[in-house]
Image: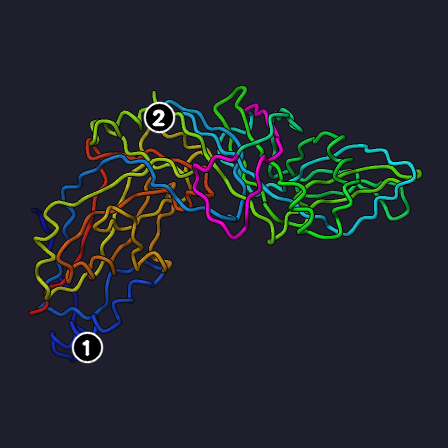
Amino acid sequence: MNSKLFTNRFLLNVTFKNVFLFLLGGTILFSCRKDGDVGLSLIGDELTTQLVDTFPLQFSIQREDTLQIKNTGRHLLGVLNDPQFGRTSAQFCTQLIPSTALTPNFSNLKIDSALLSFPFLGYFGDTNSVIQVTVKVLGKRIYSDSVYSQFSDFSNQINRVGGATFRNIQPSVTKQYREPTGSGGDTLVTRNAMLRIPIDTNLAKLLLLSNKTSSSADFLNFFNGFSVEAKLISGNGLVVYLAPALSLSGLNIYYHDAGSFKRYDFNVSSSCAWKNTFDYQYSNSEAQRALNSGQVVQDKLFVEGMAGFKTKVTISNLRSILTNKDIVIQKAFFEFPVHPSQTKIINQITPRIGMVAVDSNGKPSPVPDQFFDYFGGQYNSIKNTYEINLTQYFQKLIYQSNDYGFYILSSNGIQDGTRVVLNSNKTLTPPKLTIIYTKIP
């Protein structure tokens, strides 16, 4: 194992053992400095700091475990399709509640339109893709106090009650929408872009005349809610992120009554239930072939959002350093170069990846470093790499008898459509682990 030696000037008049105990007593948090400096300036001529970056790393591709999902911070809707990851679709379901009590004593009701609306929060993929969206009524109720998995199957009524085909979606562009005025007329209002899906006006009329708007509980028992699904018609695919419960999220019904133009909303609030689900078609993908092989046999590692693929990494010869308890880890970090097959286009490279430890049962386990700014994981467009700092975790490993490796995964996999292909250890620029440590006499 190669090592590089360098020394620093000793600045404090304390014994070596006191330095060691002082560090382990709490000041190991030195690494949370945002500038990423290595260690403390407590190393004198008598101490030697070593840098080791030749640890053999082993990788395997795995599918994400079943995750528990309940009301998430955003809906995911769309389809992504590429030969590396296969086809993954995202859909969601949601409840609605009445915005206000409505007495259905209309004199001459005429439904103009009904739109299931959600403000855009972002997207991943090709906005030139053509996506067909279908809305159905949920066949059974969902509950806000229940927990579901990303695979949960909800029965839908067979009949389609809404939908549209969307082309050239522009999630970041403001648009003008026709809205009623207090005097019964209409005006144009400029708002951030929303996905607005036409809903059958007969269903809208049924909801307005239901006499169930005075109580949210009564309405939830009367109407289960909607499921919203997507189909890719053309293009490489697109997944949009939608706001589940903003003031404009829900069903907007535009109607005329006695000559006045009005709008009534069925909103999505924190008392409602909603969830994302995902469908995977991986059979002919590169990631699936790597998973089936049981080990990485090519030059690619796969990390996917939407609870898709993750990569496990284990480290050989790590104990050759960590068996010595009289050391202080100054810095320990991974570098993961992005594979050249990835398109360097905005929103095509995932902005951040994450890393967690693996416990004895093969389950993900948090690392202490992830709660600090220095942890990293952001994409460096200049170096075309991701760097993740696990200094505290490796210091902790000195006092543990076993380690079971790490998972590289999407930083927000349940609410994230991003994916990235990284270099494996079979490339000219493989991932590497660098540990800089000081031995205390």
Residue at (18, 61) in percent of width and height: 329
Q: Magenta stretch containing residue 149, yes or no?
A: yes
Relative horizontal placement of residue 117, taking residue 324 as reference (left or right): right
As displayed, is residue 307 above or below residue 245? Answer: above
Residue at (46, 38) in percent of width and height: 152
Count of number-bearing discs: 2
Relative horizontal placement of residue 140, taking residue 108 as reference (left or right): left
Q: Which mark is residue 84?
A: 2
As displayed, is residue 27 above or below residue 417? Answer: below
Residue at (63, 51) in percent of width and height: 269
Nearer-the-camera pick, 70 or 236: 70
Separation of marks 1 and 2 at Cα, in angstroms: 54 Å
Residue 365 % position (x, y): 29, 53
**Residue most extreme to the bottom:** 13
Mark 1 or mark 2: whose residue is earlier in sequence: 1
| Amino acid carrying mark 2 in the image | Gln
The magenta segment: 129-154
Residue at (33, 33) in percent of width and height: 421
Residue 182 % position (x, y): 87, 48
Residue 37 % position (x, y): 28, 60
Residue on which the image places disc 1: 12
Please tell me how crowded label 2 is: few (under 14), some (14-19), or many (20+) other residues with Cα within 10 Å: some
Residue 264 % position (x, y): 77, 44
Please tell me how crowded label 1 is: few (under 14), some (14-19), or many (20+) other residues with Cα within 10 Å: few
Q: Quadrant of residue 418?
A: top left
Nearer-the-camera pick, 368 or 36: 368
**Secondary structure found at label 2:** loop
Q: Quadrant of residue 108?
A: top right
